[in-house]
Image (cartoon, rainbow, N blue to C red):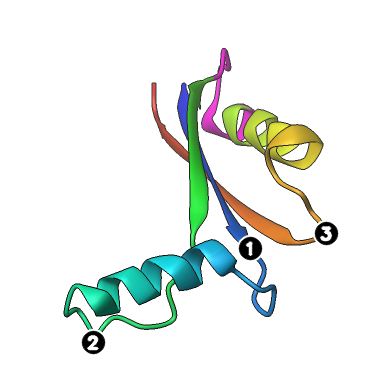
Amino acid sequence: MQVRVTVRLKSGVLDPQGKAVETALHTLGMTDINHVRQGKIFEFDVDATSADQARAEAEKAAQALLANLVIEDFQTEVLGS
């Protein structure tokens, strides 16, 4: 089953990359875009017999390696088989 793990900085954690992107967008004239936050997306296949098992494996991977739980939150979703 294919899964996606989205990792983002927790609210309140300084995001210098997001701020740099926001500044660049403003420089390009897109001044209506504000409060940019950056993140990362991981997509991978899990050998699982159910969506619940695939989600559990993805959450295990996120907690162990993909996200820094001190400063980041993550969300998992099963995309299909």
Residue at x 46%, y 21% (from the top left corner): 1
User: Does residue 56 lie above or below 77 as drawn?
Assistant: above
Question: Does the segment drawn in magenta span residue 52?
Answer: yes
* Identity of the residue furthest to the bottom in this view: 32
Q: Where is mark 1, residue-wise?
A: 9
**Residue that numbered label 3 is attached to:** 70
The magenta stretch spans which residues?
Answer: 46-53
**Picture quarter containing residue 22?**
bottom left
The foreground one among 39 and 49 is: 39
Q: Main secondary structure of the magenta part?
A: loop
- x and y percentages locating residue 7 in the rendered image: 58, 51
Where is residue 55 drawn, in percent x and y? 60, 36
User: Is 32 placed left or right of 47 in the picture?
Assistant: left
Query: Of the numbered discs in the image, which one, if any, rests on residue 32?
Result: 2
Q: Tell me if residue 79 comes above or below residue 32 in the rendering.
A: above
Q: Amino acid at mark 3?
A: Val
Closer mark to the observer between disc 2 and disc 3: 2
